[in-house]
Amino acid sequence: MTNTAARAARIALVGDRSPTVVSHTRIPLLLDALAERDRLVLDAYWIPSEEAGDTDAVRGFDAVWVLPGSPYRSEAGVLSAIRTAREAGIPFLGTCGGFQHTLLEYARNVCGLTRVAHAENDPGAEDFLITPLACSLIGHEAAVRVEPGSLAQTVIGAERTVERYFCAYGPSRHLDTLRAHGLRLSGHDEDGHVRIAELPGHPFFLASLFQPELAGDGSRPHPMVRALARAAVAHAAREPRQPLGQPV
């Protein structure tokens, strides 16, 4: 008999797990729904931000999802996990704080903007990439326009979508530099502010300021979550397996 569990893709959930963060409490519901509705079985392992910076902390996983919950206890750990996923071709999703830190990692390690900072993490810095939003999006829903032909448009299946937020920070500067170095800023709000980023040429690399894990009641995973799961399963089928710790 075939051992289905042995074929399950493994996903690293990077963040400081907390019962007070709604996104974190949604994860078990989403994993169950992915397995039951889409036959996409994932073994999920939580990686605290302090541990994410360890050598090979997320290497060997089939997907990495940097979840909301900033400020993280270790900015360096989160940035290290994002860099590993980007450079190693591991399917990646970053949402809310994960989106903010995805842009920060890219700016520092690809664009050479080594001194750019996140205002929530380092309020005394001189050069900010991520700053407080002019209008907080905590608890809000808003429309997002998605660029035709982008990964985001392919995944979402539309050029306009309404999404949920729970954040107060977003990108404000150096966006042209990010674009010039290959990052595609593929989704914007009605005022033109960046809400989605992706990396062409990567197997699956997508980040959004909005939180797809909060869509609905968790029983029907958002298309971005399903797409990450599919990418993880495809990655698991291609890559040799290595032992990890215990799943959550």
Image (tube, rainbow, N blue to C red):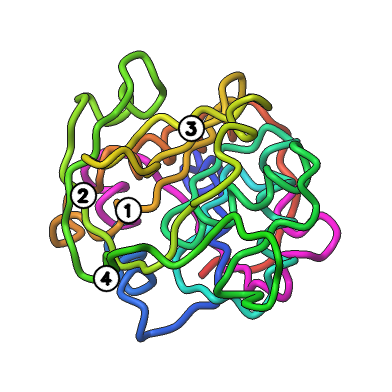
Q: Amino acid at mark 4?
A: Ile
Q: Which residues are magenta?
A: 31-59
Marks 2 and 4, how far apart at CA: 12 Å
What residue does disc 4 label?
A: 138
Q: Is residue 237 visible?
A: no
Q: Residue furthest top?
A: 149
Which label's residue is closer to the chain start, 1 or 3?
1
Q: Are the residues flagged by discs 2 and 1 in contact, CB closer than 8 Å?
A: yes
- The tag earlier along the polypeptide, 4 or 3, is 4
Please tell me which residue is depicted at 59% across the width and 35% down the height of the picture.
236
Q: Which mark sits nearer the N-terminus, 2 or 3?
A: 2
Figure label count: 4
Position of 43 relative to 228 (above/below): below
Q: CA distance from mark 2 to mark 3?
A: 22 Å
Of badges 1 and 4, nearer the viewer stands 4
Residue at 35 percent of width and 45 percent of height: 225
User: Going from the N terminus, do you reach mark 2 or mark 1 first?
Assistant: 2
Residue under label 1, please give it: 210
Looking at numbered disc 1 in the image, what kind of residue is underneath it?
A: Phe
Marked residue nearer the N-terminal end (2 or 4): 4
> Is residue 52 part of the magenta span, yes or no?
yes
Vertical comparison of 201 with 231: above or below: above
Q: Residue 10, image x and y in percent? A: 56, 50
Q: Which mark is residue 231?
A: 3
Name which residue type carries label 2: Glu
